[in-house]
């Protein structure tokens, strides 16, 4: 989710959809290898699990897993638009300050969830996201307020395909746009700079089990339309 070289200091977000649990860790990258990297954890704390949809996962035979092609573009194609428009989950990467300035600085990865279709596609370069009440830490919003550059990751849970976006975020604190989304306290607007689609990238598959019980408190989404 981070576009560019992996920094020495980083934040990671770990989510366990099968148990609807979520944890955040702040650490130091201590080793880099061809198959991954090691992180020495400096801080760890639980995060709000409110909008995590329950999914059960299975691992494919990794010896036979062959990732598909990777495509880069300056905007969303029809396939990417359809995936985003139907999503109930994605992840957002943001950053604040120098990664060397201490535990309160660095890059951050965070989960976002909502009713299916909660991310609105306005056009091939613009996404609109309602921000619901969470744990009031404002980790992501605080970062975006000071540094609007961010990365977005959407997953096709059935095929293992990933879609990543490099984007610039704008926070809308009120007004008609916020009122259009039932249950939203704010709205984020993303301007896409680059899209990267990796077909069959992951040897994992997820089976949907149930929505978060907190979705029922977000009101009626019948009037929220996705533009395609």
Image: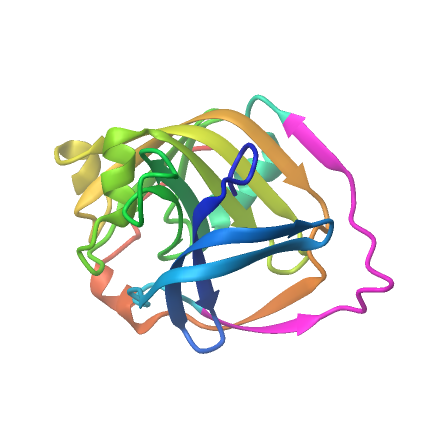
Up-down: is 27 above or below 23? Answer: above
Inspect the magenta stretch and tell me whether residue 60 lies in it.
yes
Which of the two residues, 96 or 48, is positioned nearer the viewer here? 96
Q: Answer left or right for 1 relative to 9.
A: right
Which of the two residues, 175 or 166, is positioned nearer the viewer here? 166
Up-down: is 213 above or below 113? Answer: below
Which residue sits furthest bottom? 19
For the question of whether residue 76 can be seen, the reply is: no
Residues in magenta, as a range: 54-72
Q: Position of residue 213 (x, y in %)?
A: 31, 73
Q: Answer left or right for 154 relative to 58.
A: left
The colour scheme used here is rainbow
Q: Position of residue 157 (x, y in %)?
A: 60, 59
For the point 86% across and 64% down, the residue is 63
Which of the two residues, 215 or 31, is positioned nearer the viewer here? 31
Up-down: is 132 above or below 141? Answer: below
For the point 32% across and 32% down, the residue is 189
For the question of whether residue 166 can be seen, the reply is: yes
Which of the two residues, 48 or 189, is positioned nearer the viewer here? 48
Q: Position of residue 228 (x, y in %)?
A: 47, 32
């Amino acid at each position: 989710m981070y576009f560019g070289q992996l920094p020495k200091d980083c934040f990671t977000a770990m989510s366990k959809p099968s148990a609807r649990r979520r944890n955040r860790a702040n650490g130091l990258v201590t080793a880099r290898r061809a198959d991954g990297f090691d992180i020495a954890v400096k801080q760890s704390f639980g995060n709000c699990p409110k909008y995590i949809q329950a999914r059960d996962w299975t691992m494919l035979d990794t010896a036979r897993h062959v990732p598909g092609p990777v495509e880069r573009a300056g905007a969303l194609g029809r396939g990417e638009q359809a995936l985003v428009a139907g999503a109930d989950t994605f992840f957002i990467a943001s950053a604040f300050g120098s990664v060397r300035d201490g535990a309160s600085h660095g890059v951050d990865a965070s989960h976002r969830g909502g009713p299916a279709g909660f991310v609105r596609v306005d056009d091939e370069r613009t996404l609109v996201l309602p921000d619901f009440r969470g744990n009031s830490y404002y980790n992501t919003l605080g970062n975006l307020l000071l540094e609007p550059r961010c990365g977005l990751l959407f997953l096709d849970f059935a095929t293992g395909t990933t879609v990543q976006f490099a984007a610039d975020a704008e926070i809308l604190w009120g007004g008609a746009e916020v009122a259009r989304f039932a249950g939203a306290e704010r709205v984020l607007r993303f301007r896409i700079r680059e899209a990267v689609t990796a077909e069959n990238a992951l040897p994992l598959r997820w089976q949907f089990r149930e929505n978060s019980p907190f979705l029922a408190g977000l009101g009626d989404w019948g009037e929220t339309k996705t533009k395609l």
